[in-house]
Image: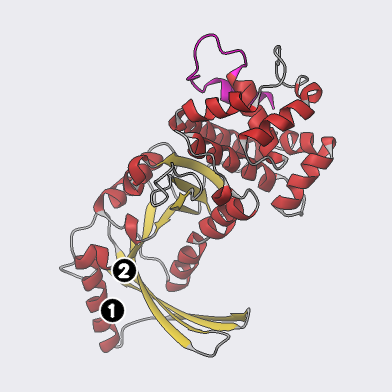
Amino acid sequence: MQSLITIFREVRDPRDFNARHDLSAMLFIALAATLCGAKSCVEIADFAEANEAALKEIVDLPHGAPSHDCFSRLFRLLDPEQLAQALIAFARAMREGLGLGSPRGVVAVDGKRLRGGYERGRAFMPPLLVSVWDAETRLSIAAQAAAGGNEVAATLAALKSVVLKGCIVTGDALHCHPEMAAAVRERGADYALKVKANHAPLFRCAEAAFALAEANGRLAVYQYSESGHDRTECRRASVIAVPKGAPAFPGLAALGRIESERVGADGKPSHKVHYVALSRRLAPQRMLEVIRAHWSVENHLHRQLDVVFFEDAARARKNYAAENLSIIRRMALDILRAHPDPRSPARKMKMALWSKPFFYELFTYMR
């Protein structure tokens, strides 16, 4: 706990010099309350009041438990970039404590809208936070608020602050652009970026190259089928070397294609084709595994934030409150996931609320 509080002490306090409550104490209380199910500044303050005596054993509270107005004002004023740096330091410390080291597998980048965090009259433009996610360990390694909803710029900024050497960075078609490819290669990583018509020259090149390879009978295909939830799906993956005359794209070494055929519960078939830009020529099976691993960021991070922490329903919306509370939730989810108890994050959250020893164990296990 003290190492976590030390990380919070590095966050610059945006409040006036006469603020009564210590910043690191308030951030720790917010994280502890979120671990126990608090979903708003009001509930965080209620948690602090109900557990004031226990919290005083961990942090200094000379003026008692902070009120909900204190928490609300802090998260409204706090620069999300400061808390994002705390998340990075927290992730590194946690990985070191767990003996994980730097990420070595698939690192997925994806944006998430905080749908309930919009200002009045701006429901069409809720805040956006970019997630950098280690798909192998299912832990967050960084997050970046996207100023003005610019996911591309926020992603490039987030990648500069994390260690990526030896990883494969994945992203959807929005991130298939030269700046992203160059940034990933500069960090010593490879990329696997989905290609769509938004990068028309590369998309047309991929279509033509695979058509020619098929016509010449030189296309190796890996096929994988699965059934479940009243549907059957068959995927066929293939990879070719980048053809001559391909558009200039930093580090481009190969192109991948994934064909997906699905028959749903209604018996209606569907067919989709996806193309992938690769900086390293992977085997078709490995390419399919990498692309499927990318969706861990949706299933195991974004969905958990909505289902367990009810993030989409959170109405903290003034200034930077939505972004800052979302970063706190990511820290809480990492702590819940890192604990070896086989219960789901939602059940661990209830255990942390009901059992003081289990609450302390969530933190001590990280050592």
The amino acid marked with disc number 1 is: Phe
Q: Position of residue 8 (x, y in %)?
A: 57, 25
Q: Position of residue 49 (x, y in %)?
A: 75, 26
Which is more N-terminal, label 1 or label 2?
A: 1
Is residue 9 one of those drawn in magenta? yes
Front in this rendered view, residue 291 or 32: 32
Disc 2 vs disc 1: Cβ atoms closer than 8 Å? yes
- Tell me the element at label 2: strand
Residue at x 39%, y 46% (from the top left corner): 122
Residue 255, numbered circle: 2
- Amino acid bearing label 2: Leu
Magenta stretch in the rendered image:
1-22
Mark 1 falls on what kind of element?
Answer: helix
Does residue 187 appear in the picture of this structure?
A: no
Q: Is residue 183 above or below residue 282?
A: above
User: Residue shown at 22%/72% (left/top)?
Assistant: 204
Taking the image as shown, residue 219 lies to the left or right of residue 79, namely left
Which x, y percent locates residue 80?
46, 33
- Looking at the rendered image, the quarter that the N terminus falls into is top right
- Overall secondary structure of the magenta section: loop
Q: CA distance from mark 2 to mark 1?
A: 9 Å
Mark 1 is surrounded, within 10 Å at the Cα level, by few (under 14), some (14 to 19) or many (20 or more) other residues, namely many
Q: Residue furthest top?
A: 18
- Label at residue 210: 1
